[in-house]
């Protein structure tokens, strides 16, 4: 036996168990891909927080709506800004009434005590003290702006919490990867041990064990790549389905369509590569465990 | 100007004529002289009564005039009082309206203030409820930052509104107090004015009663005067008759060397001159007296001239009478011819003596002094027992 036949020796000798393992690996990879894509899209808790957090530039009473809208348009083109909208005094009043129902009588004289404002939402990745400071420094000099509300004293704590939460979530992903790797390694070791008679037979006939190990790893790499692609695709569709159906998912994770953007491609490729390398490495690790040097 | 009732004046003239006739010493028959004496006594008595009646009537009229002017004055004051009361009443009504308006404004402000207070409390409750409901989480705190700011703005706005309402209410209450004070003062004033009005009404009633009494007194006096005038008329007829008898007696026993004088004023030798330099203010004949509001018959004219002016004889003649006559003061009568007499009255003094012959234009006396610098001379001309208008025969300025 030589050439590519050694790549698929496991599939040819233990086809049934290999199919079962492949199904398990697909499932694990699907979960890992889902986790990864979710983290990639949401940035951990960044998207959720950036969706919840807004910088509010309160305008002075009497500033015309056109000027307010103009300020919002100028702010919207700034780099850290995801979106900026101008809200009229009447909209501000409606928002106030939604939050504090039953206070309609406060406007009994017909005079709205609230001014208009510009609501600024940051990009998830730019939700930082620097990003906030940039927006503040852009809005502060404007004479139409009365006050800028950007979280005040609570904000640094919140940003720290965001960092810790993201770190925790990425740690979770790393754990999943490690578990995935350990399971793979155990599977490979077991399977390598089960191949012992066949490996001995081939060794007696002059085929070195290292060659068999490398060919098996190459086969595992290819098989792992196929499984990773399939699992990642499936997780993408699952995410697409969930984000389309559940607004909570859309709010917390974000719209899955965004994953098709080019900026995510390198990360996805790295993930697929890793998901392919992992089985190969696991195959080598299993071989080494089953056949220590000298045997 | 003192005005003497015409009848009494006429009676006086008659008496004066009679007095003139008697001292002339015309040789009358004894019986005629006796009768003349008797008639003179009767005339004197009647003149006295007429003068008394005239004086009483004069007094009654004066009192009536005084009371009437008092009543008029009270009426005017009452009208003024009434107008004043009406004005105060109007002002009171306006003040009452103002007060109602101010009160309703204060009530409205109070309601608005209470409403704002309620709204503030409600807002505070809502804000508290919301803060307690989850704002302890940092994210919730950040999310609620804008709403909290809105609430702060609303609080500030409401607090400002409440402050403004409080200030406005205080102002209105002050204005209300001012109006109340004004109402109080006006009420006091109107009550005072009403008291004065009542007093004036009482006075007017009293004066009206008094006036009524004077009127009835006046009527009575007028009746008396009328009776007297009738008697004087009869007396005048009697004097005329006596004059006639005297003339007849003269004709029957003419004196030696006695020249018959002119019988017309126009034929008096030397002509006639104005007794004083002045103008006629009291015309001859019947006219309506503005003071007494009665028809008066004037037998002479009244000439106004400068006080202390000399009085001149209108023509040549003999002074036949010089004496004092009630209502005419010092009186001088000059006979210019047969039945021609000129009578000068209201003089201060005369410088001629009875029986003296005077030339035309000769100074015979002087007008009295007067504070206003003007005095009046009474001039009467009689021809054949009848008074004639002096302006017809003497050039007198009007």
Image (cartoon, rainbow, N blue to C red):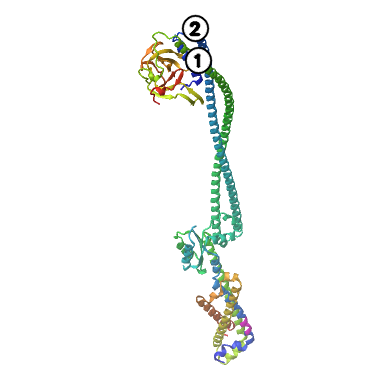
- SS assignment at label 2: helix
Q: Along the line of sight, which residue is nearer the eye, B4 or A136?
A: B4
Q: Is residue A185 left or right of residue A138?
A: right
Residue B219 position in % (x across, y down): 57, 23
Q: Is residue A291 left or right of residue B359?
A: right
Q: Is residue B339 left or right of residue A1?
A: left
Residue B166 position in % (x across, y down): 55, 47
Magenta stretch, overall SS: helix
Residue A186 position in % (x across, y down): 61, 80
Residue ID for mark 1: B241
Identify which residue is drawn at 51% across, 8% down: B31
* CA distance separating discs 2 and 1: 17 Å
Q: Is residue A227 magenta?
A: no
* Image quadrant in which you'd find residue A141: bottom left
* Image quadrant in which you'd find residue B210: top right
Earlier residue among tags 2 and 1? 2
Asked if A45 appears above or below B232 in the picture, the reply is: below
Q: Which residues are magenta?
A: A19-23
- SS assignment at label 1: helix
Q: Along the line of sight, which residue is nearer the eye, B240 or A203?
A: B240
Q: Which chain does the numbered disc 2 sit on? A: B
Q: Along the line of sight, which residue is nearer the eye, B370 or A213?
A: B370
Res. B315 in view:
yes
Label for residue B30?
A: 2
Residue A206 position in % (x across, y down): 55, 92
Position of the C terminus of chain B by quadrant: top left
Asked if A107 appears above or below B388 in the picture, the reply is: below
Q: Residues within 10 Å of mark 1 (few under 14, many from 20)?
A: few
Asked if A180 appears above or below A212 in the picture, the reply is: above
Identify which residue is drawn at 54% across, 37% down: B87
Are both tags, 2 and 1, on one chain?
yes
Identify which residue is drawn at 35% across, 18% down: B270
């Amino acid at each position: 036996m030589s050439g590519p036949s050694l790549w698929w020796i496991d599939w040819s000798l233990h086809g049934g168990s290999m199919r079962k393992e492949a199904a398990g690996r697909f499932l694990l990879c699907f979960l890992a891909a889902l986790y990864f894509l979710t983290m990639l899209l949401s940035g951990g808790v960044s998207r959720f927080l950036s969706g919840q957090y807004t910088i509010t530039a309160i305008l002075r009473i009497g500033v015309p709506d056109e000027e307010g809208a103009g300020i919002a348009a100028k702010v919207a083109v700034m780099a850290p800004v995801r979106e900026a909208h101008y809200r009229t005094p009447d909209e501000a009043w409606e928002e106030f009434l939604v939050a504090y129902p039953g206070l309609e009588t406060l406007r009994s004289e017909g005079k709205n005590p609230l001014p208009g404002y510009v609501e600024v939402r940051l990009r998830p990745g730019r939700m930082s003290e620097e990003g906030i400071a940039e927006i503040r420094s852009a809005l502060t000099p404007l004479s139409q702006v009365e006050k800028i509300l950007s979280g005040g004293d609570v904000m640094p704590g919140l940003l720290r919490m965001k960092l810790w939460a993201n770190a925790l979530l990425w740690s979770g992903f790393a754990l999943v990867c490690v578990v995935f790797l350990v399971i793979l390694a155990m599977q490979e070791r077991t399977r390598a041990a089960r191949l012992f008679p066949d490996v001995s037979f081939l060794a007696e006939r002059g085929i070195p064990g290292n060659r068999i190990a490398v060919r098996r790893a190459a086969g595992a790499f290819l098989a792992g790549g196929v499984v990773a692609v399939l699992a990642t695709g499936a997780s993408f569709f699952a995410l697409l389905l969930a984000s389309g159906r559940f607004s909570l998912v859309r709010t917390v994770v974000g719209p899955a369509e965004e994953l098709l953007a080019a900026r995510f491609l390198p990360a996805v490729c790295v993930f697929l590569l890793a998901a392919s390398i992992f089985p190969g490495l696991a195959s080598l690790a299993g071989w080494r465990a089953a056949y220590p040097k000298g045997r | 100007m003192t005005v003497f009732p015409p009848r009494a004046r006429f009676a006086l003239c008659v008496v004066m004529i009679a007095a003139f006739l008697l001292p002339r010493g015309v040789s009358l028959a004894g019986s005629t002289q006796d009768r003349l004496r008797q008639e003179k006594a009767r005339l004197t008595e009647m003149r006295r009564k007429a003068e008394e009646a005239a004086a009483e009537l004069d007094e009654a009229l004066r009192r009536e005039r005084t009371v009437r002017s008092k009543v008029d004055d009270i009426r005017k004051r009452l009208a003024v009082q009434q107008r004043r009361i009406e004005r105060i009443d109007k002002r009171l009504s306006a003040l009452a309206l103002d007060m109602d308006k101010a009160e309703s404004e204060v009530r409205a402000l109070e309601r608005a203030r209470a409403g704002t207070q309620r709204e503030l409390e409600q807002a505070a409750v809502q804000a508290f409820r919301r803060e307690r409901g989850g704002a302890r989480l940092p994210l919730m705190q950040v999310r609620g930052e804008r709403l909290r700011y809105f609430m702060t703005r609303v609080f500030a706005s409401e607090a400002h509104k409440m402050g403004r309402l409080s200030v406005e209410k205080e102002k209105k209450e002050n204005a209300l107090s001012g109006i109340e004070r004004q109402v109080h003062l006006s009420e006091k004033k109107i009550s005072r004015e009403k008291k004065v009005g009542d007093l004036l009404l009482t006075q007017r009633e009293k004066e009206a009663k008094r006036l009524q009494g004077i009127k009835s007194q006046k009527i009575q006096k007028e009746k008396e005067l009328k009776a007297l005038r009738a008697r004087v008329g009869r007396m005048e007829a009697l004097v005329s008759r006596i004059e006639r008898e005297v003339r007849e007696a003269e004709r029957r026993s003419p004196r030696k060397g006695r020249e018959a004088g002119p019988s017309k004023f126009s034929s008096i030798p030397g002509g006639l001159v104005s007794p004083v330099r002045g103008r006629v203010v009291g015309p001859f004949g019947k006219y309506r007296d503005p003071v007494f509001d009665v028809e008066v018959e004037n037998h002479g004219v009244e000439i106004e001239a400068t006080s202390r002016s000399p009085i001149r004889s209108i023509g040549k003649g003999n002074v036949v009478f010089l004496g004092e006559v009630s209502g005419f003061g010092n009186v001088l009568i000059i006979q210019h011819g047969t039945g021609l007499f000129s009578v000068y009255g209201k003089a201060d003094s005369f410088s001629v003596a009875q029986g003296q012959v005077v030339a035309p234009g000769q100074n015979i006396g002087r007008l009295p002094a007067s504070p206003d610098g003007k005095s009046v001379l009474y001039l009467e001309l009689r021809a054949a027992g009848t008074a004639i208008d002096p302006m017809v025969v003497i050039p007198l300025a009007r």
